[in-house]
Image (cartoon, grey):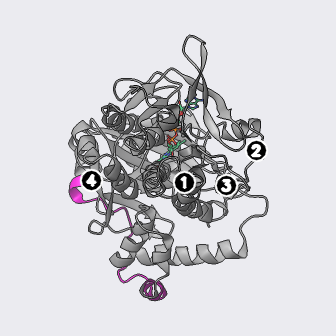
Amino acid sequence: MSERPSPAEVAVVLGGSHTGMLAARALAGLADRVVVVERDVLPAGPEPRKGLPQSRHVHLLWSGGVLAMEELLPGIGEALRAAGARRAPVTTDMVALSPRGWFRRWPESHHIVLAGRDLLDATVRSSVLADERIELRDGTEVLGLLGDAGAVTGVRLRGRDGHESTLEAGLVVDATGRGSAAPRWLAALGLPAPVRREVDSGLAYASRLHLAPEPARDGFPVVNVQADPRADGPGRAGVLLPIENGRWLVTLSGTRGGEPGSSDDDFERFAHEELRHPVIGELLARAEPLSGVSFTRTTANRRHYYERMPSWPENFTVLGDALAAYNPVYGHGLAVGAQSALILRETVRRHRWGAAGLARRIQKAVARPVGAAWDLAIGQDVFYPGATETGPTLRDRLVAGYVDRLMHTATGNGRIARRVTDVTSLERRAEVLLSPSVLLAAAVGPLKPRLTGPPLTAEEMKNAGLS
Ligand SMILES: Cc1cc2nc3c(=O)[nH]c(=O)nc-3n(C[C@H](O)[C@H](O)[C@H](O)COP(=O)(O)OP(=O)(O)OC[C@H]3O[C@@H](n4cnc5c(N)ncnc54)[C@H](O)[C@@H]3O)c2cc1C
């Protein structure tokens, strides 16, 4: 018997970032061999790299994603904590100004993981690659697909030395991110272009790393000043994320016409003067900048509806940002990537490796978490000037009116705050917000009075040098 599995038993995952690594893990044991192909040479630890420029910006990882990651990689939460990440209960460790006022710090409903993106990726990567069934081919670029419109049979690659080769496979998973060439690759096989939708609020992101004041290096809450999509004009937001090694990563953002600048002076001014509350600027005045400002405009919501294509080749599936990328301000890309990888495993297990129509089933199944995050992002972004050609529809306005009422209620009703975070954490679908008891609570409104300022405790204020 041959030691190498036949190509039909090999899975190839394109892209060795968050979704790619989790997809590889999902397929280990289902395929005889899993090969991850990544253009960058992946660093041994939490280092930045060319193919992941977004790692300089705040990355919230919501519990809906962490739960999926735990299913795929039992113990990953603990590994992240051991590496320096913190598990922050929501909304307990969150000081957040919603469009309708400050949230109270209610007892834990869900959680987020606080860490730099490079640390998140390095931890996942080392857990995944510890599995001998998974092979990494880094420094290798994917050039296209092998096969025809009926079935993909592998990929064309180019190594570091420029040498081109092919790799045959029984399943090819595209996780090459926002820049995925899948539409072009499919066209080369003779398939039509997928339906594609883009909603672009014109959001610009500016981020800077700081060292927190010494007493505030441990256990400081996330501080989040959100934009109000329904106010006139551009939305401006800021988030301060306490990450490993006592640092505060701060991202400021603004939609078309309200963008933050990319210079150091602009950064501080924007935090102080342009956000709906100056608390982030006040905190930064007492922190020490550790980097310059990183700037990006790669923030449009963009979705490919591959699941709706009239025909779909066997053995090929698209996941993660390659399938749909969201306005990062909602912090959902990582969670959807993880949930999609878990769905990949479940779908292959249920229908069996090599079953006819498997790839199409996977594509349809992952449309579910993608749709959930998409609707949350689009529901708000359509209100920003220029985001769509036609502006919000009547339905958009009705839904937004209800969400606005819910946010208002959540500022003074812990049960409704929990329901809202059920959805924003991607642990539950938005339908939970339509139950009779939630509708009733929304009609009644907040049970506690409005907070007049950020709910930082006296100790947190002192530690941060604000009192
Ligand atoms: C500014 C910004 C802030 C964000 N903030 C958040 C947040 O707070 N929370 C959150 O959940 N999400 C956030 N996101 C989204 C998050 O970064 C993505 O959802 C996530 O990285 C998607 O992972 P992925 O593996 O699908 O794609 P990526 O992480 O983009 O990885 C794609 C990989 O494919 C490789 N690759 C590309 N082309 C090829 C090729 N031809 N051959 C071989 N390899 C290739 C790349 O090198 C890369 O490693 C943010 C995004 C941006 C831009």
Q: Is residue 428 above or below residue 118?
A: below
Q: Callout 4, which amino acid?
A: Met
* First in residue order: circle 3 vs circle 4: 3
Q: Confirm whether the magenta stretch covers residue 157.
A: no
Q: Indicate the secondary structure of the residue bearing disc 1.
A: helix
**Residue topped by disc 2:** 191
* CA separation in Å, label 2 and label 1: 18 Å
The front one of 159 and 436 is 159
The reply to whether callout 2 and callout 3 are in contact (CB within 8 Å) is: no
Residue 217 as seen in the image, left or right of residue 136: left
* First in residue order: circle 1 vs circle 4: 1
Residue 362 - label? 1
Q: Confirm whether the magenta stretch covers residue 452.
A: yes
The front one of 430 and 349 is 349
* First in residue order: circle 2 vs circle 3: 2
* First in residue order: circle 1 vs circle 3: 3
Image x and y of residue 212, in percent: 30, 39
Image x and y of residue 424, in percent: 45, 63
Tell which tag, 1 or 4, sits nearer the viewer.
1
Q: Residue at x 35, y 32 (%)?
A: 129
Q: Magenta part of the protein: which range?
A: 438-461
Q: Indicate the secondary structure of the residue bearing disc 2.
A: loop
Tell which tag, 2 or 3, sits nearer the viewer.
2
* CA separation in Å, label 3 and label 4: 47 Å
Q: Residue at x 29, y 54 (%)?
A: 88
Q: Estimate how packed mark 1 is, as few (under 14), some (14 to 19) or many (20 or more) residues with alpha carbons within 10 Å.
A: many
**Residue topped by disc 4:** 461
Q: Residue at x 65, y 33 (%)?
A: 145
